[in-house]
Amino acid sequence: MALPYKRVLLKMSGEALSGKQGNGLDPEVAQQAAAEIKSALDMGVQIALIIGGGNFFRGAADMTKGMLRVEADSVGMLATLMNALLFKGYLQELGMSVCVLSAFKVEKAAEFYLPQRAIAHMEKGQVVIIAGGTGNPYFTTDTAAALRCAETQCDVMLKATKVDGIYDSDPVKNPKAVKLDTITHQDALAKNIRVMDATAFSLCMENKIEIIVFKLLESGNLKKCLEGQPIGSLVKKGG
């Protein structure tokens, strides 16, 4: 069966990897996520991965009080590198070849990120974890994911969340929240959908990047996404 996507960027939140403990990295959750990624790699899909740093940075919120935004954002970007290096081990345990690229130079921990370098690694069958956000303050990890998706010419951005798609309000707080199976970038911005920030949505819209928002930690969901099955919610091009 021909797959609709050859190369994808998967964005995972750090909080998702923390599991029920709320911070750090839950080994059981990390193993489950790694298994989902291996199933996708075995399909022949090229994968770039970006992991947020909230599971470390949120816990450090009290320590960053009083810091300048530039300095606090640097702490957050370092948290994404910590997650990248930790999760790399779980992927390698399953026999995958993994490369960590960083937006800032940390020669002993990761290679410096260049789009061409990331593409070259993916074409060799490696999972590429891109860390360090954009390398600049004032940009979220979602915006970094949208930017890297465009730079590495990925066919789609996969946004893994704790829920099974996009809702018109927070389904955790509102049991009557309605799931939106499809929505355009323009409507997502107009309705202030909070699954990603406005800059990330705008960047995807400008570069005609579709987004699939889905629940990663449900066995087989990533594979179904890559097969084009209707999983989660699709943010599509308007018109």
Image (cartoon, helix red, strand yellow):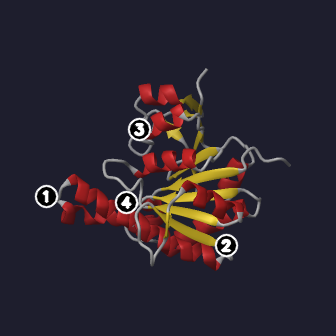
Find out whether the residues at labels 1 and 3 contact each other: C-beta distance under 8 Å.
Answer: no
Residue shown at the point (41%, 67%) measured from the top left: 105
Residue identifier under label 1: 66
Residue sitting at the far right: 1
The reply to whether residue 71 is in sight is yes
Q: Is residue 238 above or below residue 119?
A: above
Residue identifier under label 2: 96
Kind of residue indicated by mark 3:
Thr
The reply to whether residue 36 is in sight is no
Judged left or right of residue 7, residue 187 is left
Judged left or right of residue 115, residue 69 is left
Q: Position of residue 108 (x, y in %)?
A: 45, 78
- Of pointers 1 and 3, the one earlier in the residue sequence: 1
Residue identifier under label 4: 54
- Of pointers 3 and 2, the one earlier in the residue sequence: 2
Find out whether the residues at labels 3 and 2 contact each other: C-beta distance under 8 Å.
Answer: no
Residue identifier under label 3: 199
Q: Crowding at label 3, few (<14), some or many (≥20) Cα neighbours within 10 Å? A: some
Residue shown at the point (86%, 49%) measured from the top left: 1
Please tell me which residue lies in front, 30 or 20. Answer: 30
Q: CA distance from mark 1 to mark 3?
A: 26 Å
- Number of numbered labels in the structure image: 4
- Of pointers 2 and 4, the one earlier in the residue sequence: 4
Q: Is residue 95 above or below residue 160?
A: below
